[in-house]
């Protein structure tokens, strides 16, 4: 899987993703990361990539030409038309399902904007998807692109080892993770829940599932609505005084 990032700050992308699990996947050749500097494609003699907005207003707008030429350079390398994801707070909100689906692509190009935006004409010409990472405004698209690349990569075969993969399971069922504990058994008078020391696997599994259910119900009612509940889940939640409709 090949990631291309069109950006004015390639170092930010490279240094952010060349460490930890994504860094290991890049070293192994399971994913490749190409940060392409949009400024390298300017034909302005002062290397400018932005200009004042037509119609007036604050801020500067990134010009169409360097962005278009940067894209064409990547398209020529790939030799086919890739998905081009424009990072923008005005896009569809990124989620785990999108990460899983995008992990099937062979090539993905990210376009990171800065200043007040990018000339609409080039966006119309090259962008296939507009994606936001949440309802807040960042100074540029680099952090959002890095967030997406990290989340997508985890779903590419071979990126996570077996132990790391197992940890992902619960989110697929629209439930949040149960709490984890490690040694020592007592930390500042706080004890590890007894059941986890029991060695009784079925009880441990049930306890963890119950913790996930309660946590999701309390913290993310929107996710909880979509969670798949079985008979034991419903029984437990009713015992907790939580009203559940049988579907
Ligand atoms: N660019 C600026 N803010 C953003 C956000 N929240 N998501 C994606 N791209 C952005």
Image (tube, rainbow, N blue to C red):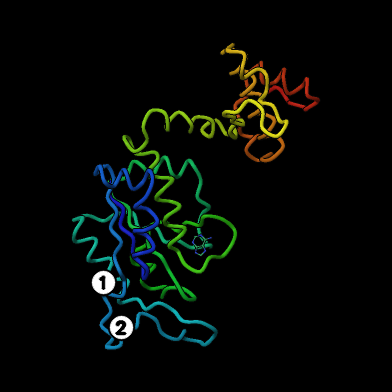
Q: Secondary structure at mark 1?
A: helix
Q: Position of residue 121 (x, y in %)?
A: 38, 73
Which of the two residues, 193 or 57, is positioned nearer the viewer here? 193
Residue on which the image places disc 2: 47
Residue located at (81% from left, 25% from top): 241
Q: Secondary structure at mark 2?
A: loop
Figure quadrant of residue 74: bottom left
Residue located at (33% from left, 57% from top): 109
116 is higher (above) or lower (below) than 99: below
Q: Quadrant of the C terminus?
A: top right
Residue on which the image places disc 1: 69
Which of the two residues, 188 or 228, is positioned nearer the viewer here? 188
Q: Position of residue 184 (x, y in %)?
A: 60, 28
Residue located at (59% from left, 11% from top): 200
197 is higher (above) or lower (below) than 121: above
Left or right of 196? Residue 14 is left
Q: Position of residue 232 (x, y in %)?
A: 66, 16
The mark tally for this picture is 2
Distance in Å between CA atoms under marks 2 and 1? 14 Å
Within 10 Å of disc 1 (Cα), the crowding (few <14, some 14-19, many 20+) is some
Left or right of 187? Residue 67 is left
Which of the two residues, 44 or 201, is positioned nearer the viewer here? 201
Circle nearer the viewer, 2 or 1: 2
Residue reaching furthest right? 241
108 is higher (above) or lower (below) than 29: below
Within 10 Å of disc 2 (Cα), the crowding (few <14, some 14-19, many 20+) is few
Figure quadrant of residue 29: top left
């Amino acid at each position: 899987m090949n990631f291309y990032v069109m950006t004015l700050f390639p170092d930010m992308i490279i240094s952010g993703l060349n460490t930890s699990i994504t860094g290991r996947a890049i070293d192994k050749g399971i994913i490749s990361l190409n940060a392409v500097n949009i400024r390298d494609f300017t034909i302005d003699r002062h290397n400018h990539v932005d200009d004042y907005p037509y119609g007036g207003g604050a801020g500067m707008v990134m010009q169409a030409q360097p962005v278009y030429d940067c894209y064409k350079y990547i398209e020529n390398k790939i030799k086919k038309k890739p998905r081009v994801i424009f990072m923008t707070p005005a896009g569809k909100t990124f989620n785990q399902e999108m990460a899983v689906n995008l992990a099937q692509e062979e090539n993905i190009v990210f376009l990171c904007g800065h200043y007040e935006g990018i000339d609409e004409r080039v966006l119309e010409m090259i962008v296939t998807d507009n994606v936001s990472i949440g309802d807040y405004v960042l100074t540029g698209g680099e952090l959002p692109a890095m967030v997406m690349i990290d989340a997508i990569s985890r779903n590419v075969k071979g990126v996570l080892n077996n132990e790391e993969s197992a940890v992902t399971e619960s989110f697929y069922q629209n439930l949040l993770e149960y709490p984890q504990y490690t040694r020592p058994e007592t930390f500042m008078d706080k004890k590890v829940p007894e059941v986890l020391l029991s060695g009784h696997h079925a009880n441990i599994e049930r306890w963890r599932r119950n913790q996930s259910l309660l946590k999701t119900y309390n913290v993310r009612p929107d996710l909880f609505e979509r969670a798949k509940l079985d008979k034991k889940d419903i029984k437990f939640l009713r015992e907790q005084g939580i009203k559940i409709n049988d579907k």
